[in-house]
Image: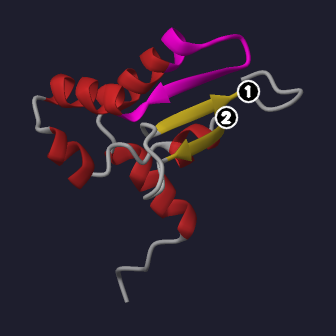
Amino acid sequence: MTVKPLSPDQVQQEKILSFPDEVIEVFNALIIENWNGHSATVLQDEAVSRISAALGISREATFRFHYLDVESLYRAEGWEVKYDNSEYNETHSAFFVFKKPEGGHA
């Protein structure tokens, strides 16, 4: 067999390499803009708008290509990341929270 199945670590690495730089640049900018010294709350709608504009794609394409699935990328860099989407009986907008770990230097 010349082709081997991917390992979980390889999948993660491939995912990192396949993300357009513009997606990470958008999230980095939003984290900086919303940083309060301990955490940053990034609204999903704002991220989608900026990613769509940066890549020249539709909002729907941003979701279809999973460009919002950045949690594991930022966790790998030491962030605590939480994604919150409203439940069927809630009305708040979806958002990400990027938090410096307790005692961490993120």
Instruction: Determine the residue positioned at 39% across, 35% down.
Output: 44
Image quadrant for the N terminus? bottom left
| Residue farthest bottom in this picture | 1
**Would you say residue 13 is visible in this rendering?**
yes
Kindly state the secondary structure of the residue where label 1 is placed.
Answer: loop
Instruction: Determine the residue positioned at 43% across, 45% down.
Output: 16
**Would you say residue 21 is visible in this rendering?**
no
Q: CA distance from mark 1 to mark 2?
A: 6 Å
User: Percent x, y for residue 55?
Assistant: 17, 29
User: Percent x, y for residue 26?
Assistant: 36, 23
Instruction: Determine the residue positioned at 48% across, 36% down.
Output: 95
In this picture, residue 60 sits left or right of residue 21: left
Give the residue type at disc 2. Answer: Trp
| Residue farthest front in this picture | 89
Residue 49 lies in the magenta-colored region: no
User: Percent x, y for residue 31?
Assistant: 52, 19
The number of numbered discs placed on residues in the rendered structure image is 2
Whether residues under marks 1 and 2 lie with C-beta atoms below 8 angstroms apart, the answer is yes
Q: Would you name the residue on which mark 2 appears?
A: 79
Q: Which mark is residue 100?
A: 1
Above or below residue 10? Residue 65 is above
Q: Which residues are magenta?
A: 31-44
Image quadrant for the C terminus? top right
Identify which residue, 13 or 84, lies in the foreground: 84
In this picture, residue 95 sits left or right of residue 54: right
Instruction: Determine the residue positioned at 54% across, 14% down.
Output: 34
The answer to which of marks 1 and 2 sits earlier in the sequence is 2
Identify which residue, 88 or 40, lies in the foreground: 88
